[in-house]
Amino acid sequence: MNIKAKKTEITIKAIILGVLLSAILAAANAYLGLFAGMTVSASIPAAVISMGVLRLFKNSNILENNIVQTSASAGESLAAGVIFTIPALVLMGYWESFDYFEVAKISAIGGLIGILFTIPLRQVLIVRAKLLYPEGIATAEVLKAGHNTEKLNDESTSSSLKIIGISSLIGSLMKLGQSGFSLWGSAIEGAKNFNNIIFGFGCDLSPALVSVGYIVGINISTVVFSGGLISWLFAIPIYSFINGFQGNSFEAAMDIWNSKIRYLGVGTMVIGGIWSLIKLSKPLIDGLKISFQNLNKSKNNESKDLPINIVLILLLCLLPPVILLYFNIINSLSIAIILSLVMMFFGFLFSAVASYMAGVVGSSNNPVSGVTIATILFTSLLLLLILGKNSPNGPAAAILVGAVVCCAAAIGGDNMQDLKTGYILGATPIKQQIMQVIGVLSSALVLGLVLDILHSAYIIGSPEMSAPQATLMKSVSEGVFTGNLPIEMLIIGSIIGVIIIIIDVYLEKKSYSFRIPVLAAAVGIYLPIQLTFPVFIGGLISYLSIKKMNNKLLQRRGLLLASGLITGEALMGILIALPIFISGEKNWWPSFNFPEFGIINLGSVLFISILFWFYNSTTKK
């Protein structure tokens, strides 16, 4: 039901709160993505926190609240675009450390391009096609519940804030014990050698990963975990049997996965990105037609979007700084122009893909990393053709093209989720688009500092902060120039992707509720098993709790609990890193080692206790 009464949307307090929350949530999601290789939508916790603050003022309203979460969620999404790509520049040695101003420039340009590219799609994807946009609907429900005092069965705003506060505290204490005081290991891992065939398995003791699984649900978490099983239950044992391996530890299985098997996921991702483009071609063309039709009828334009002529002018204004960005690394104006045009082409296509996919599977499941890999692979091949194998900066240039595209795609999906929320609530689209810009610029100003702090404390690329996507982007771009890409794995991965697509199309035609998104499976294939297993546990808790207590109140409580666990763990991870960054002392935190008895240790006991608490909290009224 749309809220038709005119209410003030953009206010000074909304802008200030939006700026602060976008910066904080960008930092939290940057940590989560570098650690887990996955990010989640921050719209719901942003909506609840802003409700708690705005209720201190007399004249706050639901549309003002919506404006705040619009800005805040932009910060979370931009973080994904940054941490999936930019750390690769440090990992490959192009940067010795993170250049604050370069990170700010790259992320701001990419985020603004993502907003502008998706504006023409709102009418066709939200208004006409009425795509679901699950996080957008969920956020609208939370906002309506918080502003409707007549619903006796709804959680009050104070109660919702209490839920987020308690779960944030639990998540932060787990992280403090693990990474601050080293009271227990970060994961339970093990491997077994059966007749010269190695099997490895593990589970990270992270409540945040469980929360990711809860948010994305049983369908997606099962597909992600199944992708992990393709790698760890089948591919690694088969490869070890044919080619042999050294050692019998979990590290032996990890070495096989890292050097060979994860490229199955790259091949699957490329096929998934192409398939997404094929499915999106018609909605994309329709969106552009509607935008130009609205421009011709500007006097009676009811779309209330930023006009398409202004969008085109702003995109042209962004083109010179993009050209300069690539000129600084290639030192050739003609090649810089070519790269800029390639970036704009892929940026538009993949922002549209991300917008469409967010409407189908949600922002948390959006295949941003998949489309970025496709961009980097194509750009690397193009630069290889132009510059040759001996180009020292070719891989880095490909990463920079992918970085802008990744930021644009991440923001594109988030933009559409927020516009869906606004559509339900009766908000003004152009005002939300303005707040998206504010959120992008705010988060762009902090992400470089956050990366520097985390790198100083954990070393991005280390086992503690493995940066899975950035590591993969580095491997792809360098592999094209060195010829070291395992082509056979890419081909097999592509075949796996085609098979998954065929199965999913069959499930769609038969109207099955369970689906197999190819890009979700690809994510599972190239993530370590110790990350995908807790995600599956979270999805299982979501399924069991909803089945036992099919109650919207309890489902919302579960989302708040999950959001709090993620936020608490992520922010504590940054706080742990802060004194190390300031002092330069890696061993700043005192270390205490509790005794372990096999897989039984203090961390595993606490982790299992949190699982039971989480499940009970979502099944008890």
Image: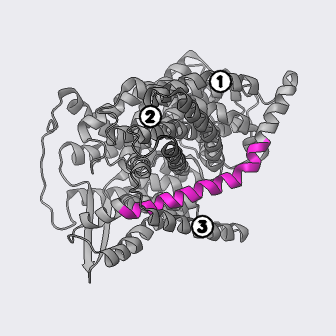
Q: Residue at x 68, y 49 (%)?
A: 132
Q: Is residue 359 left or right of residue 373?
A: right
For badge 3, the amino acid type reads Val
* N-term mark: 3 or 1: 1
Instruction: In this rendered view, identify the residue nearer to me: 49 or 80.
Output: 80
The residue identified by callout 1 is 316
Q: Is residue 337 left or right of residue 456?
A: right
* N-term mark: 2 or 1: 2
For badge 2, the amino acid type reads Ala
The answer to whether residue 79 is above or below residue 12 is below
For badge 1, the amino acid type reads Leu
Viewer can see residue 54: no
Mark 1 residue crowding within 10 angstroms, few (<14) / some (14–19) / many (20+): few
The answer to whether residue 592 is above or below residue 310 is below
> Disc 3 versus disc 2: distance between alpha carbons?
35 Å
Q: Quadrant of the N terminus?
A: top right
Mark 3 residue crowding within 10 angstroms, few (<14) / some (14–19) / many (20+): some
**Residue 412, quarter of the rendered image:** top right
Q: Residue at x 81, y 37 (%)?
A: 290
SS at circle 3: helix
Viewer can see residue 415: yes
The answer to whether residue 339 is above or below residue 437 is below
The residue identified by callout 2 is 26
The residue identified by callout 3 is 498
Mark 2–mark 1 CB contact (< 8 Å): no
Residue stretch in magenta: 260-286
- Judged by its main secondary structure, the magenta piece is helix
SS at circle 1: helix
